[in-house]
Image (cartoon, rainbow, N blue to C red):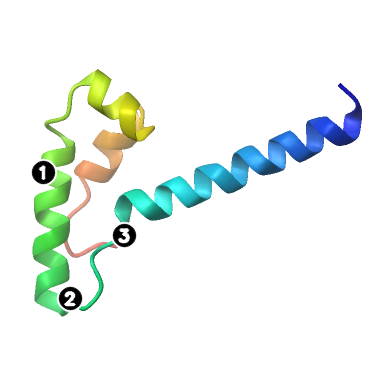
């Protein structure tokens, strides 16, 4: 591959990674402050219960899931 193609592929990979993180961790629209905290608490707790195959399906490593799952619900 040429140098330009390599750069474009790297940029595309970064863009896809950023979009995926956004989609995975976005809360439903219209939640108030308490609703958002409850949503975070539930989804983070469930994230820690996923097995390797399920994590692979959503594009996360075990380390990424643990890092997100262990964050307190009041942190975004």
**Which percent across, then down, holds residue 60?**
36, 32
Q: Nearer the viewer, residue 8 or 33?
A: 8
Q: Are marks 2 and 1 in contact (CB under 8 Å)?
A: no
Callout 1–callout 3 Cβ contact below 8 Å: no
Residue 35 is marked as none
- Looking at marks 1 and 3 on the same chain, the residue that comes earlier in the sequence is marked by 3
Relative to residue 46, is residue 73 depicted above or below? below
Is 39 situated left or right of 25 in this image? left
14 sits left or right of 52 in the view: right
Secondary structure at badge 1 equals helix
**Residue assigned mark 2:** 31
Spot occupied by residue 32 in the image (x, y as percentages of width and height): 15, 80
User: x%, y% of residue 26?
Assistant: 31, 60
Q: Would you call the spot at circle 3 few (<14 residues within 10 Å), some (14-19), or many (20 or more)?
A: few
What numbered label is drawn on residue 26? 3
Dot 2 or dot 1, earlier in sequence: 2
Q: Residue at x 17, y 58 (%)?
A: 40
Spatial separation of the CA atoms under disc 2 and disc 1: 19 Å
Write the residue at 13% across / 66% down. Answer: 37
Q: CA distance from mark 1 to mark 3?
A: 15 Å
Q: Residues within 10 Å of mark 2 (few under 14, many from 20)?
A: few
The mark nearer the N terminus, 2 or 3, is: 3
Q: Which residue is mark 1?
A: 45
Secondary structure at numbered mark 2: loop
């Amino acid at each position: 591959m040429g140098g330009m193609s390599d750069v474009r592929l790297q940029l595309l990979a970064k863009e896809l990674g950023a979009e995926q993180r956004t989609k995975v961790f976005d809360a439903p629209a219209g939640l108030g402050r308490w609703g958002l905290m409850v949503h975070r608490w539930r989804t983070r707790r469930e994230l820690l219960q996923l097995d390797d195959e399920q994590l692979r399906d959503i594009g996360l490593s075990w380390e990424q899931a643990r890092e997100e799952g262990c964050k307190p619900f009041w942190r975004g």
